[in-house]
Amino acid sequence: MDACCGADGSDKYDAVFDERFARAVARRYRRHGLSRAERRIVEFATAVGIDGASVLEIGGGVGEIQLELLARGASSTANLELAAAYETEAARLIEEAGVTERVRRRVGIDIARRPQLVETADVVVLHRVVCCYDDAARLLTAAADHARRAVVFSYPPSNWLSRAFVRLSNLALRLGDRSYQGFVHRPDEMFRVLRERGLRPLGRRRGPVWNVAGFVRA
Ligand SMILES: C[S@@+](CC[C@H](N)C(=O)[O-])C[C@H]1O[C@@H](n2cnc3c(N)ncnc32)[C@H](O)[C@@H]1O
């Protein structure tokens, strides 16, 4: 792991995405494999051609999507995280999968604020991340500018239910003295950003909690 902890406003993420969260995600992946939204992300990524491809995942947590893409032929993956707590679980999963040489993990670099520190990749993935970041346009601009072939990302549907859920969660976080907040960004605005950076829609899959969209370089 390349560490750069405390940089780029990572403290607010550390307070929420802690070891317990990391352990829960790793346990769920070991027991049940990928979630439905994660499977859809993998389907989009393989549809654009994952064999021999490099993958950059922004906010990739313990890295389960990357492990599945490596198993399907990706040559290498790079993970960017603002929270440091995933690294122990991620290292275990990487070792179990026998892909240590093909994975790079970096903590504390916000690609939206310091895009020049991050290398480009064929495919850029963001799962459950735009909803954790206030400036989705800036984050997706950086994602698009680092994607040679495609950007695949998940986002919560913009409806009253998800907005109510996020409002309630944010209230609970504030009451618990956490500065981290969630967001429901407008999908059309996010798609517009990707189009403006030279990507065109490949498709969209809707789900009750997470929608997944794939964009490819035009
Ligand atoms: C809800 S968690 C999801 C983690 C993982 N993708 C998963 O589905 O288990 C959101 C993650 O996004 C990370 N994150 C948010 N903005 C980020 C950014 N600009 N760069 C890297 N990581 C970011 C947070 O640190 C947090 O771990």
Image (cartoon, grey):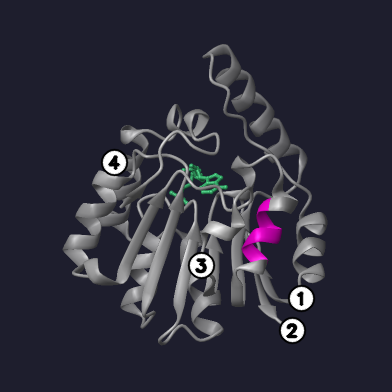
Q: Are marks 2 and 1 in contact (CB under 8 Å)?
A: yes
The amino acid sitting under disc 3 is Glu
Marks 1/3: CA–CA distance: 18 Å
The magenta stretch is 139-144
Q: Secondary structure at mark 4?
A: helix
Q: Secondary structure at mark 2?
A: loop
The amino acid sitting under disc 1 is Gly
- Residue 163: assigned label: none
Judge whether 49 appears above or below 55 on screen: below
Report crowding for label 3: few under 14, some 14 to 19, many 20 or more residues within 10 A (C-alpha): few
Marks 2/4: CA–CA distance: 39 Å
Please report the residue visible at 54 percent of the width from the left and 83 percent of the height from the top.
47
Report crowding for label 1: few under 14, some 14 to 19, many 20 or more residues within 10 A (C-alpha): few
Residue highlighted by disc 2? 218
Which quadrant holds residue 218?
Answer: bottom right
- Residue 119: assigned label: 3
Q: Secondary structure at mark 3?
A: loop
Q: Are marks 4 and 1 in contact (CB under 8 Å)?
A: no
Residue highlighted by disc 1? 198
Judge whether 200 appears above or below 134 on screen: below
Is ligand 1 within 8 Å of the beta carbon of the residue shown at mark 1? no
Task: Name the main secondary structure of what is drawn in magenta.
Answer: helix
Marks 4/3: CA–CA distance: 28 Å
Q: Upstream in the sequence, badge 4 or badge 1? A: 4
Which residue occupies the foreground of this view, 5 or 131? 5
Judge whether 86 appears above or below 41 on screen: above
